[in-house]
Image: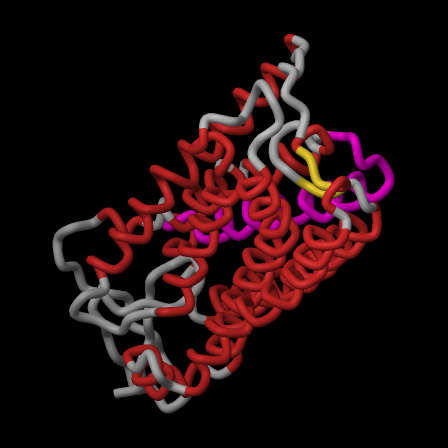
């Protein structure tokens, strides 16, 4: 490793400051608050472990990209080999982790919204962490991410000279283009699939809102605004992946993904019920057989708005 101090331009210093600030505020402060508050609000209701896992992956994401900051080696001489190779392996796998966790969360939502009459059984499944559905949706992102750890780990063993902080300025990575292309392409494809599912969910819920005259509730809760915000961020991330493939030296994707924790908090942390500490009654949903039911605000659906419907 080089021992000489690497000079930084004012632009690079500004980008570093923005990068670490976004991760600290979003990933180290707001995401833990969101995760803790979600667990506390659902302590007596149906627990949504898939959403907990989604928040946790973003926490891991921010920790991974700030390892050099924790070690005090974000500037100056090249970081020590042990921390550099660890981060270099993780930075190719953790984006896959958060992308897949996002996709599984939206997939869970789409499965629940496809058949409103199945909500009661889904509510029971959400209470049981060891249900097959929960285990698959929670474990799959980690299994996939583990597969993406293999390539960088092999590189760290056999091509040590390719790994350096100077490759990306913000963190340690490898200068082998194949790793960047595979990781960025995979993240982009997963996010694109997630966007497609989000659009289908939004269309389905918009139709349901018109039929059941729930438009005022959707508007008051900002439901579709949050869907639009999250979808827009995913589309920006897809574009950023394309930029990284075509222009590896561009910091566009790095800054866009550093905004991820803040966007997640803005989308999931602004639901009215999450911050309403008083127990309030939930909306009643009329089904085809004219039966209605109401659930506590501590019951949750896994997507944007903590509302659970059930069949009486």
| Image position, residue 239 (x, y; %) | 75, 43
Q: Which is nearer the eye, 35 or 4?
A: 4
x then y, percent, for residue 238: 72, 48
Q: Is residue 203 visible?
A: no
Q: In this view, does 153 lie to the left or right of 305?
A: right
Q: Quadrant of residue 29?
A: top left
> Height in image: 198 above or below 288?
above
Q: Position of residue 189 (x, y in %)?
A: 74, 60
In the rendered image, the quadrant that contains the N terminus is top right
Q: In front here: 302 or 201?
A: 302
Q: Which residue is drawn at 65% across and 13% down?
A: 8
Residue in the foreground of this view, choosing between 163 and 282:
163
Any part of residue 123 in sight? yes
x, y percent for residue 193: 69, 64
Which residue lies at the image location 32% right of the left edge and 46% below the top edge?
A: 32
Q: Nearer the viewer, residue 310 or 174?
A: 174
Q: What stretch is highlighted in magenta?
A: 221-250
| Residue 281 sits in quarter | bottom left
Position of 295 compared to 11: left or right? Answer: left
Q: In this view, does 290 lie to the left or right of 230?
A: left
Query: Magenta span has 299?
Result: no
Seen at 48% across and 48% down, the residue is 226
Q: Height in image: 93 above or below 295?
A: above
Q: Looking at this rendering, what residue extends furthest in the bottom direction? A: 289
User: Does 247 appear in magenta?
Assistant: yes
200 relative to 65 in the view: left or right: right
Q: Main secondary structure of the magenta part?
A: helix
Based on the displayed image, in which of its 4 quarters is residue 75 positioned?
Answer: top right
Residue placed farthest to the top in the image? 10
In the image, farthest residue toward the left: 278
Residue drawn at the location 15% of the way across and 50% of the way down: 277
């Amino acid at each position: 490793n080089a021992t000489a101090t690497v000079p930084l331009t004012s632009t690079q210093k500004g980008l570093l400051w923005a990068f670490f600030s976004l991760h600290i505020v979003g990933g180290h402060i707001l995401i833990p608050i969101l995760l803790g508050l979600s667990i506390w609000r659902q302590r007596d209701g149906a627990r949504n472990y898939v959403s907990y896992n989604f928040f946790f992956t973003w926490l891991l994401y921010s920790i991974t990209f700030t390892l050099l900051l924790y070690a005090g080696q974000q500037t100056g001489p090249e970081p020590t080999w042990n921390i550099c190779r660890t981060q270099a392996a993780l930075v190719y796998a953790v984006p896959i982790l958060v992308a897949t966790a996002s996709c599984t969360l939206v997939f869970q939502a789409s499965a629940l919204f496809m058949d409103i009459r199945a909500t009661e059984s889904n509510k029971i499944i959400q209470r049981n962490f060891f249900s097959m559905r929960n285990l698959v949706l929670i474990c799959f992102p980690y299994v996939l991410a583990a597969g993406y750890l293999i390539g960088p780990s092999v590189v760290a063993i056999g091509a040590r000279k390719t790994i350096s902080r100077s490759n990306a300025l913000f963190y340690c990575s490898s200068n082998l283009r194949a790793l960047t292309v595979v990781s960025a392409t995979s993240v982009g494809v997963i996010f694109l699939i997630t966007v497609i599912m989000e659009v289908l969910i939004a269309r389905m819920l918009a139709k349901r809102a018109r039929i059941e005259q729930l438009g005022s509730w959707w508007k008051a809760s900002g439901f579709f605004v949050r869907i639009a915000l999250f979808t827009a961020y995913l589309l920006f991330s897809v574009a950023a992946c394309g930029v990284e493939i075509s222009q590896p030296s561009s910091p566009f994707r790095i800054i866009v993904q550093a905004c991820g924790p803040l966007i997640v908090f803005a989308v999931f942390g602004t639901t009215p019920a999450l911050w309403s500490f008083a127990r309030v009654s939930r909306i009643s949903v009329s089904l085809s057989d004219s039966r209605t039911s109401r659930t506590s605000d501590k019951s949750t659906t896994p997507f944007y708005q903590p509302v659970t419907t059930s069949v009486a």
